[in-house]
Image (spheres, helix red, strand yellow):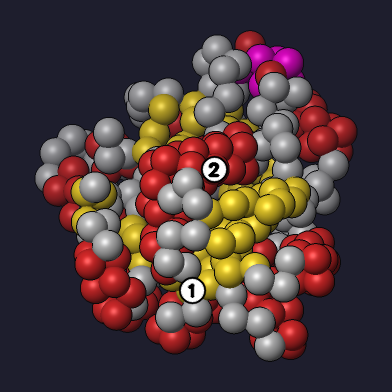
Amino acid sequence: MSYKFLPVAGLIAAALVGSTFSTRAADIKLGLAAIDLQNSFFVRMKEGGDAAAKDYGVSANWQSAQGSLDKQVGIVENFINQGVDGILIDPLDKNALIPVIKKATAKNIPVITMGNKVEAGKNYSTLYPDYENIGVVAHALGAAIGGEGQVGLLVGTRGNFVSDTREKGFVDAMKKYWPKVKIIGIEPTGWDSAKATNAAQTWLATYPDLKGIGCISDSMCLAASAVTDAMGADVKFAGYDGDAEMQPLIDSGKMVMDVLTGAQRVGYWNIAVAARLAKGEKMKNDLYMPTYFVTSKETAKMLKDNGIDVDTITTQQETKASKDYSQQLGPQQPVSAMSVK
């Protein structure tokens, strides 16, 4: 089975065509309804988004829903009433937000559902190849534990498109490639590291032969790995996001594979897209970000020995790729650089 990552070179190549963005956008005001702003991924996402706002000369008002769907709807309602030039939403529930999204687009406010495919008519969706990527992650984890045994999966919230898609991709791939691997639990954490910690403790107490834990977001893996360290358990991890804290786990072999979207890259990309839409640039409704599979050289060899043909980068290469977002996606680039499809 062959898997290929989406190279940053694709974005750079895209920069060779199309017109460039005018930075005269000081009056553009964007509103962002985040899931929360405490989780490390979301904190870094805001950092990258703020950098994009500065580069593009727009203002970005970040509001935290604190994990509450009702609060997220209220935040979007307030942005509509304020007459912002663009609204970005990290949807807690892809269906429940459709009415308020339609209300915004009816007022000609561009709406971006971040990392989510939300069918609300005129909204834009900034997406990742989540199903395919997490399938590779599951395949790699299965190989690392010898093709059999018990694993757990930590997810976000049910109804969240990213979480649901990654959960399905993990389960489907494990069933397809490693039918002797048993998923003993799928635990919604609400993107809360404390809940990930509790789940790992429960699993280890209940299943002392637990061999692996998959995570649809790295912060969950980081919390769970602290539990396994404390309990002296030999558990392999596999995750998603490309958080820098995971690099020692990858280099040691404890973490089999990670997927780099890069929290700061994600934040920068979304604000860049919103700024361009608010300025009147035309884009497809579905936009796709490039990602990378990250692993150690030793694990990459193990995967190849198991017939898993996947392009990977090392943690050193990941560090560079995660910081190139301004060059790749900045206002000097044409609109065509905003999506790999």
Q: Where residue 328 sits in the image (x, y, percent)?
A: 29, 56
Residue drawn at 47 percent across, 46 percent down: 179
Residue drawn at 47 percent across, 68 percent down: 145
* Kind of residue at badge 1: Met
In front: mark 1 or mark 2?
2
- Residue 1 horizontal side relative to residue 144, left or right: left
Q: Secondary structure at mark 2?
A: helix
Q: Where residue 294 sits in the image (x, y, percent)?
A: 36, 67
Q: Where residue 11 sits in the image (x, y, percent)?
A: 24, 49
Main SS, magenta region, reads: helix
Asked which quadrant contains residue 49, the reply is bottom right
Q: Where residue 94 sits in the image (x, y, percent)?
A: 66, 28
Asked which quadrant contains residue 224, the reply is bottom right
Question: Which quadrant: the C terminus?
Answer: top left
Q: Secondary structure at mark 1?
A: strand
Q: Which residue is mark 2?
A: 171
Q: Is residue 278 above or below residue 269?
A: above
Q: Is residue 308 above or below residue 231?
A: above
Residue drawn at 42 percent across, 23 percent down: 285
Q: Which residue is mark 1?
A: 255
Residue drawn at 21 percent across, 36 percent down: 19
* Kind of residue at badge 2: Val
Badge 2, how many Cα within 10 Å: few under 14, some, many 20+? Answer: some
Please report the bounds of the magenta region as a residue range.
Answer: 99-105
Among numbered discs 1 and 2, the one appearing first in the sequence: 2
